[in-house]
Image (cartoon, helix red, strand yellow):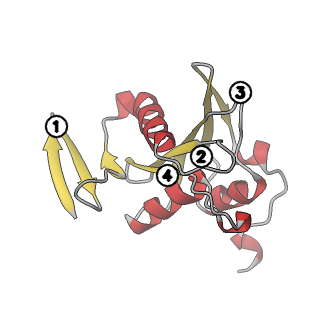
């Protein structure tokens, strides 16, 4: 793990040239989420749909984790940005999504797909915010609004 300190913000990088997560100051949380989701979206691999998505998660350690969509010629094998960011969070030791922010190249406001809603549910609590940044403004949802009466691990215990 590569550790870099810059202006009082400690950055943790899993790969020396790839910043996928870092610690932040709370007062700049939403701006940082937007910035990192947009940077991730720019790195998306979407040659078939030309529909790029970026996601940034603030976890229970106040760490941001970014992810982008990665398409595959065999469509079901692609990875959504939300799933990519959740994987980065889990790899770094995060367990709860406090906030997840999404950006896309879509012309309309784009919320997570059904599969990603279920993935977000797995790592959310009642306070989790799902934020979509579109047309220079944010719209915030709860997981209950996006996935009402959902299935979760509590049914398996």
**In the image shown, does 102 or 39 lie closer to the viewer?**
39
Which residue corresponds to the image point at 77% horizontal and 55% vertical from the top-left?
114
**Pointer 4 local density, CA inside 10 Å: few below 14, some 14–19, many at least 20:** many
Q: Secondary structure at mark 1?
A: loop
Mark positioned earlier in the residue sequence (2 or 4): 4
Instruction: Give percent across and percent down for residue 108.
Output: 74, 28
9 w.r.t. 113: above or below = above
Nearer to us of marks 4 and 3 is: 3
Mark positioned earlier in the residue sequence (2 or 1): 1
Nearer to us of marks 2 and 3 is: 3
Q: In the image, is 20 to the left or to the right of 133? A: left
Real-space CA distance between mark 4 and mark 3, rounded to the nearest whole angstrom: 20 Å
Real-space CA distance between mark 2 and mark 4, rounded to the nearest whole angstrom: 18 Å
Mark positioned earlier in the residue sequence (1 or 3): 1
* Cβ atoms under marks 2 and 1 closer than 8 Å: no
**Pointer 1 local density, CA inside 10 Å: few below 14, some 14–19, many at least 20:** few
Q: Secondary structure at mark 3?
A: loop
Which residue matches tag 3?
107
Q: In the image, is 3 to the left or to the right of 18? A: left
Which residue matches tag 1?
8
């Amino acid at each position: 793990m590569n550790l870099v300190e810059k202006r009082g913000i400690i950055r943790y990088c899993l790969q020396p040239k790839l910043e996928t997560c870092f610690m932040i100051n709370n007062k700049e949380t939403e701006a940082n989420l937007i910035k990192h989701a947009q940077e991730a979206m720019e790195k998306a691999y979407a040659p078939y749909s030309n529909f790029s998505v970026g996601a940034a998660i603030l976890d229970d350690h106040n760490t941001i984790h970014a992810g982008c969509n990665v398409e595959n010629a065999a469509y079901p094998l692609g990875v959504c940005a939300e799933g990519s960011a959740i994987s980065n969070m889990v790899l770094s030791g995060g367990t709860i999504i406090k906030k997840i922010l999404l950006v896309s190249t879509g012309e309309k406001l784009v919320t997570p797909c059904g599969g990603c809603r279920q993935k977000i549910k797995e790592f959310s609590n009642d306070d989790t915010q799902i934020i979509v940044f579109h047309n220079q403004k944010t719209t915030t949802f709860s997981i209950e609004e996006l996935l009402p009466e959902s299935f979760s691990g509590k049914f398996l215990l």
